Image (tube, rainbow, N blue to C red):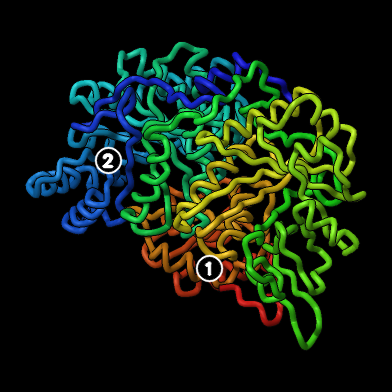
């Protein structure tokens, strides 16, 4: 493991434990300034064809009425860029002054026109001045410099226009759409993403243009978080201006998957004080994205630690790459085991076999056996409850210590012991003991006892309003004392709507899991929704952090004016046929701009290539072109079968 000193780690944030938002330049975007002391702004992107003026205007109005502060509109060619003027004029006549952002791909002349018409342009350095052929090229330093000179020549006119018209610019790198030149030198890495943006930023600063926003987006929250952190460190190291950041997990998908994946990436960075504007990319109507982004941003309006967290003097985690913390193996927890999921049944009045259905266990009376789903929890915390029936063989139970003393002879039942009682030396299981602790409970005496105990698993909790950093501090305390006890991350929530629970838990736990911290998760949710939803949220957080894969992953773009088919309908159709393919990643992209590069690490891709036509990919390779849309889903299934990743749906199991 790389050991990063606190000074190095802090190059990407002000503090690892005490909330402090990064201070940036103010970027003027119309009459809604970004960065500095301004609030975290919320934005989204239209999905209507840009040439449909009235359709675009009506959708923008719905977005603004939902709370959208910036609206992005695609301008893939000159004709769309020209029509931005008509859209803007109609909006202004209706009294809507929302700043408009032109989204540019491939076409510098469209960007140069749009920069004269709207408040901001967004370019992707991976395809603004480069074409992507997935070729690996050996560059001499001279040849590489010649490429940079070519980029400068293409990019300079846009910078000069932005300066003249007071237009802001977002330099937005996307993982998977890096140019062949960057890929050849840096690989498909966070460093490659950062360098791709910095090449353009150096040109802009040479031309004294600073009205710039930066982004590092990926469909993989791990990569996204690492790239933003590295970007900030590089800005500081190379004495760039402190530019504001646009945060987003691209192609996050729809429903709870899209919300949880977005929260893991965006929330992790917001916790560290990074981020000045956010866009939650969902395969839904754009106005549905806005309240999700608002809910994420609102948590930081008055964020501060309610309990003082001791500063970290030495951070034993590399924040720019993933390495899982090394821990001992206690039964099936820690070591090389996937993170475990613990469910909370401590407040149940009565627990029956039917109660376990919500947790992924289905009892068949005729067969007298349990059927175990992919998202079946590993442990249940019962509190003082007891169970009077035979539980599934893969399930373990945890009970409060005094209750466990009366149940200790039952199989797979283990004590849940508060740290102070554990330290005193109460009776323990000879197999597994859950030790419950907050940061205040952790001292050298407790750590010494944990180090000597081969049966202990720490279940951590927090009552701090700034809870994730407090739990991060607890992990650092363990690592500084070379304590390799497995840790289950516990968080308690109360009286939240289901969607808020998903967003908050994904932020609070995801930020630790992204850094390789945690051997399991335990969500205690009182009056926050169904047991099934809470259990699935835990598994979805692990899936989003790529730490435990339990189902098919869909990398689905959020639709825009370039989209060549109904993304929501098509995504639902593909889900209905493939949701049983555990671990398979399927990219569903509305147009060639968002594929194949934007699919990043998808195993299979379904990409719009023309009206009524689909191109199918295996990895980044085209397998079939111009497949008629009515046959395209069937052809995708055949491609998955040919690739050896298809399994038949088990009898009696629905994939819907």
Instruction: Decide which of 514, 563 is in the foreground and name it.
Output: 514
Seen at 72% across and 63% down, the residue is 385
**Does 110 sit above or below residue 414?**
above
Residue 81 image-quadrant placement: top left
Q: Secondary structure at mark 1?
A: helix
Instruction: Decide which of 497, 15 is in the foreground and name it.
Output: 497
Q: Which residue is mark 2?
A: 70
- Residue 229 in sight in this render: yes
Expressed as whole percent of the image width and height from the top left, the position of residue 186 reads 60, 28
Neighbourhood count class around disc 1 (C-alpha, 10 Å): few under 14, some 14–19, many 20 upward: some
Seen at 53% across and 68% down, the residue is 574
Q: Assign the N terminus to one quadrant of the image.
A: top right
Q: Secondary structure at mark 2?
A: strand
Residue at the extreme left: 93
Neighbourhood count class around disc 2 (C-alpha, 10 Å): few under 14, some 14–19, many 20 upward: many
Q: Which residue is mark 1?
A: 574
- Disc 1 versus disc 2: nearer the observer: 2
Expressed as whole percent of the image width and height from the top left, the position of residue 560 reads 34, 53
Seen at 41% across and 62% down, the residue is 567
Residue 540 image-quadrant placement: bottom right
**Does 291 sit above or below residue 180?**
below
Q: How far apart, in angstroms, are the residues tagged by discs 1 and 2?
A: 32 Å
- Residue 179 in sight in this render: no
Instruction: Decide which of 324, 597 is in the foreground and name it.
Output: 324
**Does 4 sit above or below residue 173?**
above
Expressed as whole percent of the image width and height from the top left, the position of residue 253 reads 48, 55
Q: Assign the C terminus to one quadrant of the image.
A: bottom right
């Amino acid at each position: 493991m790389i050991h990063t000193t606190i000074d190095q780690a802090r190059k990407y944030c002000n503090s690892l434990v005490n909330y402090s938002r990064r201070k940036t330049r103010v970027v003027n975007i119309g009459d809604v300034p970004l960065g500095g002391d301004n609030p975290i702004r919320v934005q989204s992107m239209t999905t209507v064809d840009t040439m449909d003026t009235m359709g675009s205007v009506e959708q923008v109005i719905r977005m603004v009425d939902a709370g959208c502060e910036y609206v992005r509109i695609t301008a893939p060619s000159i004709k769309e860029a020209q029509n931005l003027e008509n859209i803007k004029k109609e909006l202004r006549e209706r009294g809507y002054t929302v700043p408009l952002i032109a989204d540019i791909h491939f076409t510098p002349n469209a960007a140069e026109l749009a920069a004269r018409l709207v408040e901001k342009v967004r370019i992707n350095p991976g395809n603004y001045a480069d074409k992507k052929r997935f070729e690996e090229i050996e560059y001499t330093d001279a040849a590489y410099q010649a490429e940079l000179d070519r980029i400068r020549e293409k990019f300079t006119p846009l910078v000069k226009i932005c300066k003249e018209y007071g237009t802001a610019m977002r330099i937005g790198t996307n993982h998977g759409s890096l140019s062949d030149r960057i890929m050849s030198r840096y690989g498909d890495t966070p460093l490659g993403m950062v360098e791709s943006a910095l090449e353009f930023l150096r040109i802009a600063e040479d031309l004294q243009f600073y009205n710039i926003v930066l982004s590092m987006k990926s469909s993989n929250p791990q990569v996204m978080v690492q790239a933003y952190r590295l970007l900030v460190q590089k800005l500081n190291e190379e004495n760039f201006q402190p530019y504001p950041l646009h945060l987003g997990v691209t192609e996050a998908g729809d429903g709870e998957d899209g919300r949880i994946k977005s929260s893991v990436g965006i929330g992790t960075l917001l916790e560290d004080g990074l981020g000045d504007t956010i866009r939650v990319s969902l395969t839904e109507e754009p106005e549905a994205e806005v309240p999700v982004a608002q809910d994420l941003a609102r948590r930081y309006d008055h964020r501060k630690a309610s309990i003082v967290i001791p500063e970290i003097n030495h951070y034993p985690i590399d924040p720019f790459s993933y390495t899982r913390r090394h821990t001992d193996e206690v039964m099936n927890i820690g070591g090389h085991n996937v993170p475990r999921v613990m469910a909370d049944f401590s407040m149940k009045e009565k627990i029956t076999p039917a109660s376990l259905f919500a947790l992924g266990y289905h009892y068949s009376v005729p067969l007298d056996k349990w059927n175990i789903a992919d998202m079946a929890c590993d442990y249940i915390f019962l509190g003082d409850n007891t169970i009077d029936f035979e539980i599934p063989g893969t399930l373990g139970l945890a009970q409060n210590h005094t209750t466990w003393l009366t149940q200790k002879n039952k199989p797979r039942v283990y004590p849940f012991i508060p740290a102070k009682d554990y330290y005193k030396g109460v009776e323990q299981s000879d197999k597994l003991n859950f030790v419950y602790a907050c940061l205040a409970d952790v001292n050298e005496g407790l750590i010494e006892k944990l180090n000597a105990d081969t049966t202990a698993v720490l279940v951590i909790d927090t009552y701090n309003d700034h809870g994730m950093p407090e739990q991060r501090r607890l992990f650092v305390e363990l690592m500084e004392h070379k304590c390799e006890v497995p840790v289950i991350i516990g968080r308690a929530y109360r009286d939240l709507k289901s969607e808020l629970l998903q967003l908050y838990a994904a932020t609070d736990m995801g930020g630790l899991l992204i850094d390789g911290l945690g051997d399991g998760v335990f969500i205690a949710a009182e009056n926050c929704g169904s047991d099934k939803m809470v259990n699935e949220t835990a598994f979805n957080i692990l899936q989003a952090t790529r730490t435990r894969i339990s189902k098919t992953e869909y990398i689905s773009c959020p639709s825009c004016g370039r989209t060549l088919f109904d993304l929501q309908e098509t995504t639902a159709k593909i889900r209905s046929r493939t949701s049983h393919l555990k671990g398979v990643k399927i990219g569903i992209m509305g147009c060639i701009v968002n594929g194949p590069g934007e699919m990043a690490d998808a195993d299979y891709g379904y990409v719009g290539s023309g009206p009524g036509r689909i191109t199918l990919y295996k990895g980044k390779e085209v397998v079939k072109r111009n497949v008629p849309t009515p046959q395209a889903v069937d052809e995708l299934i055949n491609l998955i079968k040919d690739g050896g990743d298809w399994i038949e749906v088990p009898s009696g199991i629905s994939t819907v």
